[in-house]
Image: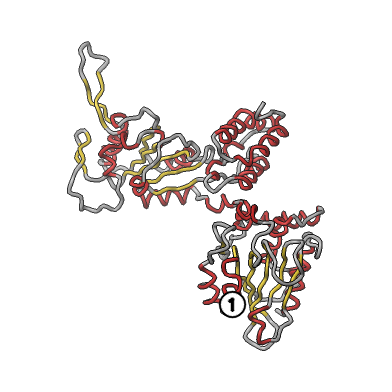
């Protein structure tokens, strides 16, 4: 593709989504250099309004740095798309650079795993490792990244250009970056511009849905790893998923931990015989003992432990903690006695699913030794195909969490089951009696402080109720 045609298409498409040169941003380009300097200096892009048309600038810019073909023409074969901070660093964008929502806007663009980005967009001291590896190995003719801007680059993608295009058929890889930057800068001012941005960005998966596994995928992991934990916020379907997987087994044991659960309850113990006139004790096999005994008969057995972190795990598991070990082979020298059993490992045909609510910070912390023995799978809030699923309300909540939550607080986002309601009235009841108390509890515990006013207004507009009187 010819360089000037590429540059024109980029600028025209940006104008179609609201960019107005010299008003809401500055358009810069530097392409008319001698051909022997082309590969080092050619670029075009957008910087924050209020900057000079040339020279050093500050804050976030979106730059396009094309790669020349190997002939003497002005044709290009690839282009690096770069979100970069000007050499004068931050003047106005410092606060929003620290917001996780800024990073999440552009994290969404990573649908093909070709976008590289920093975990902290306010970090302008460290280089992205891929700048000195991927680019120099695969695209050595795009060199000015590391040499001129290195630490200032917070995200980039390299797109191969195989065919000519105009603004009417500009590839999606370029559209998504321009629309994300347009949304970030607030360029769209009319319905046509806003619709184009929404249509382009709606094709991207949400951050949550990209990371969610299907039940079949979780089942395959269970068969491979034997002991798994399904963790997630309330409503993400942890127990629901475990019970669905249980339908694949003929022999299932279920227990739910609580603060008073003990070794005697879960593994093996004794308890008074209340039917006797004298004080005598009888054996009390726990659900783990029963699962082991049944598995020893050759049957595949699934043990589900719901809310596994509600109990004191060290006390509940006791010495059987030693048995939850994958790939032990036959090298164990010591056996654990459980009732009439003496074993050095759990049966190969015994599978365990635990569920854990990541939102309940008052619960027991799971230590690293136990984490090593289980495979941890996070279930995240996601859009589901259900006739009563209220997608609009779900996305409103997701957007509020994306704007305000830290990475850790994203684990608090209410799951999809909260948004299943047969009609508007049923959804209002869920908002009033389930979601509003949950969000209020989060805020009272010190989470999501910057989201307080937005949630207060949201609930008042939706159900006419004040979260705080």
The quarter of the picture where the N terminus appears is bottom right
Q: Secondary structure at mark 1?
A: loop
Residue 239 place in picture, x, y as percent: 47, 38
State the image quarter where residue 323 is shown. Answer: top left
Q: Is residue 76 at least partly visible in the picture?
A: yes
The x, y position of residue 444, in whole percent, is 57, 33
Q: Residue furthest bottom?
A: 72
Q: Nearer the viewer, residue 7 or 441?
A: 441
Q: How is the image coloured?
A: secondary structure
Q: Which residue is mark 1?
A: 143
Nearest the eye: 89 or 282: 89
The residue lying furthest to the top in this view is 277
Q: Residue at x 38, y 50 (%)?
A: 223
Determine the image quadrant of residue 136: bottom right
How many marks the image carries: the answer is 1
Q: Determine whether 207 is above or below 250 in the image.
A: below
177 vs 111, left or right, is right
Instruction: Report if residue 306 is visible in the image.
Output: no
Task: Locate residue 173, reporting x and y percent.
Answer: 65, 66
Which residue shows up at 58% across the image and 45% down it? 405
In which quadrant is the C terminus drawn? top right
* Whether residue 198 is situated above or below residue 32 in the rendered picture: above
Q: Is residue 359 above or below residue 63?
A: above
Would residue 227 appear left or right of 155 to someone viewing this image? left
Q: Residue at x 75, y 76 (%)?
A: 5
| x, y percent for residue 288 | 30, 36
**Left or right of residue 144: residue 179:** right
């Amino acid at each position: 593709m010819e360089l000037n045609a590429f540059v024109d298409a980029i600028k025209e498409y940006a104008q179609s989504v609201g960019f107005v040169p010299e008003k809401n941003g500055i358009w810069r380009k530097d392409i008319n250099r001698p051909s022997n300097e082309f590969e080092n200096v050619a670029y075009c892009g957008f910087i924050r309004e209020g900057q000079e048309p040339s020279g050093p600038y500050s804050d976030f810019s979106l730059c396009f740095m094309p790669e020349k073909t190997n002939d003497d023409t002005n044709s290009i074969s690839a282009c690096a798309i770069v979100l970069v901070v000007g050499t004068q660093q931050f003047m106005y964008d410092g606060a929003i650079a620290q917001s996780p929502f800024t990073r999440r806007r552009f994290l969404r663009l990573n649908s093909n795993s070709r976008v590289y980005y920093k975990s902290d967009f306010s970090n302008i001291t460290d280089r992205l490792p891929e700048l000195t590896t991927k680019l120099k190995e695969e695209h050595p003719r795009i060199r000015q990244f590391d040499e001129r801007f290195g630490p200032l680059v917070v995200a980039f993608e390299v797109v191969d250009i195989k065919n000519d295009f105009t603004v009417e058929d500009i590839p999606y890889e370029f559209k998504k970056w321009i629309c994300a930057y347009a949304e970030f800068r607030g360029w769209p001012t009319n319905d046509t511009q806003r619709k184009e941005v929404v249509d382009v960005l709606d094709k991207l998966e949400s951050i949550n849905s990209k990371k969610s596994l299907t039940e079949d995928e979780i089942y395959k992991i269970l068969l491979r790893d034997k002991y798994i934990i399904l963790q997630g916020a309330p409503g993400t379907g942890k127990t629901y998923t475990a019970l669905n997987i249980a339908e694949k087994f003929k022999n299932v044991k279920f227990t739910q931990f609580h603060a008073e659960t003990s070794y005697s309850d879960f593994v093996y113990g004794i308890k008074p015989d209340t039917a006797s006139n004298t004080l005598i004790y009888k054996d009390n096999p726990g659900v783990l003992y029963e699962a082991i005994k049944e598995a020893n008969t050759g049957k595949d057995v699934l043990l589900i432990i719901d809310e596994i972190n509600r109990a004191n795990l060290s006390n509940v598991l006791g010495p059987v903690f030693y048995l939850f070990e994958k790939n032990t082979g036959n090298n164990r020298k010591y056996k654990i006695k459980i009732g009439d059993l003496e074993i050095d490992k759990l049966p190969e045909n015994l599978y365990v699913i635990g569920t854990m609510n990541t939102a309940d910070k008052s619960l027991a912390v799971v230590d690293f030794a136990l984490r090593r023995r289980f495979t941890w799978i996070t279930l995240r809030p996601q859009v589901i195909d259900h006739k009563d699923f209220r997608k609009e309300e779900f996305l409103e909540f997701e957007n509020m969490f994306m704007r305000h939550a830290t990475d850790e607080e994203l684990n608090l986002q209410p799951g999809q089951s909260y948004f299943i309601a047969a009609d508007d009235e049923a959804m209002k009841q869920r908002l009033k009696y389930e979601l509003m108390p949950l969000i209020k509890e989060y805020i009272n515990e010190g989470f999501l402080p910057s989201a307080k006013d937005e949630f207060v207004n949201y609930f008042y507009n939706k159900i006419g109720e004040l979260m705080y009187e």
